[in-house]
Image (cartoon, grey):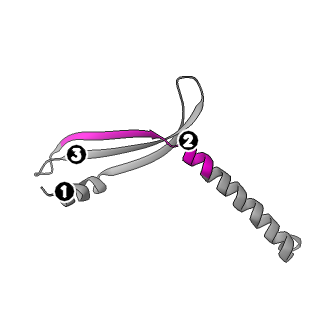
Amino acid sequence: MTGKRQEEILKRFTERYSLRASSKDGATIYVELTFAIIHDRDATVIGALAHARDISERWAREREQRERLQQLEQKLKVVTGAEDAE
């Protein structure tokens, strides 16, 4: 099976989830979990692959971006007078 074919199979059977969790010290962290079912050439399931990674820094950056966007949208409403129309 070629590398490209393996990638296609993995994409088809891969699921990704992001969730909030607690670390050993009790701190809140954000984790991305990826799961994949592994098949042989005959499409028989031969195993599974799971991977977890800490995405807390990315999540914090995205939260800051969302907050900044909300602030800018509020300022735009004030400047354009759209706030009075609501």
Q: Is 82 situated left or right of 45 in this image?
A: right
- Give the magenta part as a residue range: 46-61
* Residue 86 in sight: no
Q: Is residue 52 magenta?
A: yes
- The residue that mark 2 highlights is 56
- The residue that mark 3 highlights is 38
Dot 3 lies on which element?
A: strand
Which badge, 3 or 1, is on the more N-terminal residue? 1
Which three-letter amino acid code belongs to the residue tagged 2? Ser
Dot 1 lies on which element?
A: helix
Q: Is residue 31 above or below residue 43?
A: above
- The residue that mark 1 highlights is 3
Q: Is 3 situated left or right of 60 in this image?
A: left
Residue displayed at 57% across by 44% down: 57
Observer-side mark, 3 or 2, equals: 2
Which badge, 3 or 2, is on the more N-terminal residue? 3
Which badge, 1 or 2, is on the more N-terminal residue? 1
Disc 1/disc 2 C-alpha distance (Å) = 32 Å
Q: Given contact means CB atoms under 8 Å apart, are the residues at marks 3 and 1 in contact?
A: no
Q: Is 69 situated left or right of 57 in this image?
A: right
Q: Position of residue 43 (x, y in %)?
A: 15, 51
Q: Is residue 54 magenta?
A: yes
Which quadrant holds the C terminus? bottom right
The answer to which of 21 and 24 lies nearer the viewer is 24
Residue displayed at 33% across by 39% down: 50
Q: Position of residue 34 (x, y in %)?
A: 38, 45
Q: How crowded is the residue under tag 2: few (<14 C-alpha within 10 Å), some, or many (20+)?
A: some
